Image (spheres, helix red, strand yellow):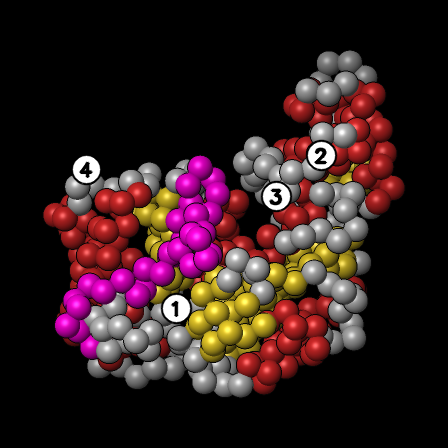
Amino acid sequence: MTAPPHQSRSRTPDTQQGMRRRNLSRVMYTLAAEGPLSRAAVASRIGLTRAAVSTLVDELLRSGMLEELGPERPGRVGRPGSALGVSGSGPAGLGAEIGVDHLAVCVVDLRGQVRTRAERQVGNRGRDPRSVVRDLAALLRRAAIEATAEELRPAGLSVAVPGLVGRDRGTVVRAPNLDWHDIELPALLSELMPDEMPKALPVAVENEANLGALAELWLGEDTPGDFVHVSAEIGIGAAVVVDGRLLRGTRGFAGELGHVPVRPDGPACPCGSHGCLEQYAGEEAVLRTAGLESGAHARELLAERAAAGDKRVRDALHTAGTALGVALTGAVNLLDPRLVVLGGALAPLAPWLLPAAEEELARRGASPAHGIAVSRFGSQGPLLGAAHAVVRSVLDDPAGTSATI
């Protein structure tokens, strides 16, 4: 697990207790990112005495968050210390995703390893939210049973949704592609949560593009602290990361790239506007232009046809890439990010999308061309980001009995 310098989600008062909690967090982050390490090595990295670190480590060992792994590897001068590592059991992150055409859940341990995963293909557009959550609860039950068998216990649940989420991180204010408005998702989940799940489990809801961006930030290799992440499934969302933090906006709605008009006189969009990016670069729009039917394997078919040289498919992807470049130009000119990351369902189509998008950026951009990188997580990014959000809540406050995610 890679980790940037620790930044607490909440400011703990500068008391002895507050300092202890922060130092416990520093030990956990160090071992999660660099372990296994000895107590002396941890002390050297975080700038505390070995005695202080030993006290912190003993507390984390008792809680089950760390484990002794035996003597350090050979090659070090002096008597070898005992190597410490983050435990593969105990608290874990539970992530879930509600997509337009699927539901998914996964459990990630404190080492950052995915331990169980379940997915169901189901059309959720226009479905009653209670029915969707009931199906999601069935997947959560399966994940909870498998996690228990692995001696893991979820420390929280983070849910990715394709829509606008309020700053309370509970209300789905609007999800046009689901046809949801003002849905209090945590309340529904609490009502329908399976018995196998821990009681009073902390639940947070987040926009799927935001969680995809956090997966890039936390798990990507050499991802800068300033970037725009584009996440595309049926719809298109974006997230803006500035100085290693999400830019949420006043109401928490920042990043709605899919509803940026690229042709104001274009076709109507479910959001109520016309000519939005989704109407040209969203999955359904690309399939329609390419003359292909929607379906379980439509994305794979697009890539296969494009690779085979199908002119109609390539033309559709060129049109989508051009529209994407137009929309991104505004974001790039306004924010000047170091990088644009293409994720979600568009990632496998990058060879045919990016040339047109990069051409538009180069032609319209106010500054020299910005690079566009392709996410290595693709459509898995939001789900991974959701589970890792819970993991990091535990690392932020190992002593907390109910971390806020």
Q: Which mark is residue 233?
A: 1
Q: Measured from the top left, where is residue 372 in percent x and y?
A: 29, 47
Secondary structure character of the magenta stretch overall? loop
Query: Is the Cβ of the residue at disc 4 closer than 8 Å to that at disc 2?
Result: no
Q: Which residues are magenta?
A: 238-267
Amino acid type indicated by mark 4: Pro
Q: Which residue is mark 2?
A: 13
| Image position of 278 (left or right of 85) | left
Q: Earlier in the sequence, mark 1 or mark 4?
A: 1
Q: Which residue is mark 3?
A: 9
Q: Is residue 258 magenta-colored?
A: yes
Which is more foreground, mark 4 or mark 3?
3
Amino acid type indicated by mark 3: Arg
Which is more foreground, mark 4 or mark 2?
2
Task: In the rendered view, tell whether residue 319 sits above or below residue 399.
Answer: below
Q: Measured from the top left, where is residue 9 in percent x and y?
A: 61, 43
Q: How much space separates mark 4 and mark 2, taking CA atoms? A: 45 Å
Quadrant in which residue 243 is drawn: top left
Which is more foreground, mark 1 or mark 3?
3
Quadrant in which residue 33 is drawn: top right
Quadrant in which residue 47 is drawn: top right
Amino acid type indicated by mark 1: Glu
Q: Which mark is residue 295?
A: none
Q: Which residue is mark 4?
A: 368
Q: How much space separates mark 4 and mark 3, taking CA atoms? A: 35 Å
